[in-house]
Image (cartoon, rainbow, N blue to C red):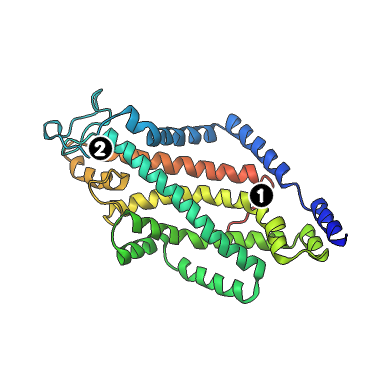
Amino acid sequence: MEAGQAVAAERLLRPNVVGRSVRAAGRAARFVLHDPALLFASLLLGILIFLAIFGSVIWQKDPLAINLDQTLQPPSWAHPMGTDSVGRDVFARFNGGAQISLSVGAIVVVAGALLGGLIGVLAGALGGATDNASMRAMDSLLAFPPLILAMAVTVGFGIGLKTAVLGIILTTIPYYARLVRSDVLRVRSMNYVEAAAALGASRPRIMARHIVPHLGSTMLIQAGAVFGYAILAVAALGFVGLGAQIPTPEWGTMITEGLDNVLTGGWWVGVFPGIGVLMAVTGMSIIADRARDIFDPRGEYIRV
């Protein structure tokens, strides 16, 4: 009987997470409709997502097909983004680059959130030696500039797209971990969590029912920032030859290939993939910035 009363009391004390989510979704819809910058960012990302999913269906050309009779053709109806130095269609390669970049961004966001979020939750909830050891490990990773650390991992495990993604994921874990830990410490100090503990709720139950559900907005805001960073990082690694390798249709490698043609007039080879990177990073940066206003209108979100 006492256990049943404790559970009932917990339900009354716990904030309505579902209600907060519904209200946040309503605020998001209003923001999109009334915020020109957010609408513009959503349009940019929507175009890239559409091309990544349906580009190969709409424009049925092989991004790896070489045609030496059509080298360095300027943008036209036959080739909307022109052709490169060996006659490959740049638009087809742009669509392939969108698919790779957006996929990498999604993988990095999910993997970094799972690993970093788990470390942050355990550190904040358990405290003591667990907190100290995990945060010192995160500090050791933060001592390196993110892109340099990703380069080191890529060189150490072998040059290629897969190892580049692994290196980028590693650089995002400390940011997730420290941010989630700070949020866990904040939530732990709230009255409803202390009341649940006083009613006899176990630590795992408190973590699962009262702490973790309130980390969603924080994780979402950080995910938006990480997504843009991942796209920029994979393009940077491809540009310096440590990520995707030529002739893979990835925006970084395409920019590298286009450098040789800039001075000869073939500007389109490197400019269009550069525009793709700009669209993705700009769009996601605006969305991440607006997400903070949507989910944290009182300005309580603190980046660690």
Q: Is residue 44 left or right of residue 258?
A: right
Q: Secondary structure at mark 2?
A: loop
Q: Is residue 77 left or right of residue 235?
A: left
Foreground residue among 86 and 59? 59
What residue is pinned by disc 1? Answer: 299
- Pinpoint residue 272: horizontal percent, then vertical percent: 31, 37
Specify few, some or many for label 1: CA neighbours under 10 Å numbering under 14, 14-19, or 20 or more. few
Residue for badge 2: 63
Q: Which secondary structure lies at badge 1?
A: loop
Which mark is first along the chain, 2 or 1?
2
Task: Tell us which disc is closer to us: 1 or 2.
Answer: 2
Residue 235 in percent (x, y) is at 34, 49
Can you give x and y, in whole percent of width and height, for residue 109 in the image? 48, 51
Q: CA distance from mark 1 to mark 2?
A: 46 Å
Q: Is 262 or 213 nearer to us in this picture?
A: 213
Please report the residue visible at 86 percent of the width from the left and 57 percent of the height from the top.
Answer: 5
The residue at the point 25 percent across, 47 percent down is 256
Which residue sits at x=33%, y=36%?
95
Q: Position of residue 65 (x, y in %)?
A: 19, 37
Q: Where's the N terminus, which quadrant?
A: bottom right
Query: Is disc 1 in contact with disc 2, using a CB cutoff of under 8 Å?
Result: no
Q: Residue furthest bottom?
A: 129
Residue 125 sits above or below residue 288 on the image: below
The answer to whether residue 90 is left or right of residue 162 is left
Amino acid beneath label 1: Gly
> Which amino acid type corresponds to the residue marked 2 in the rendered image?
Pro
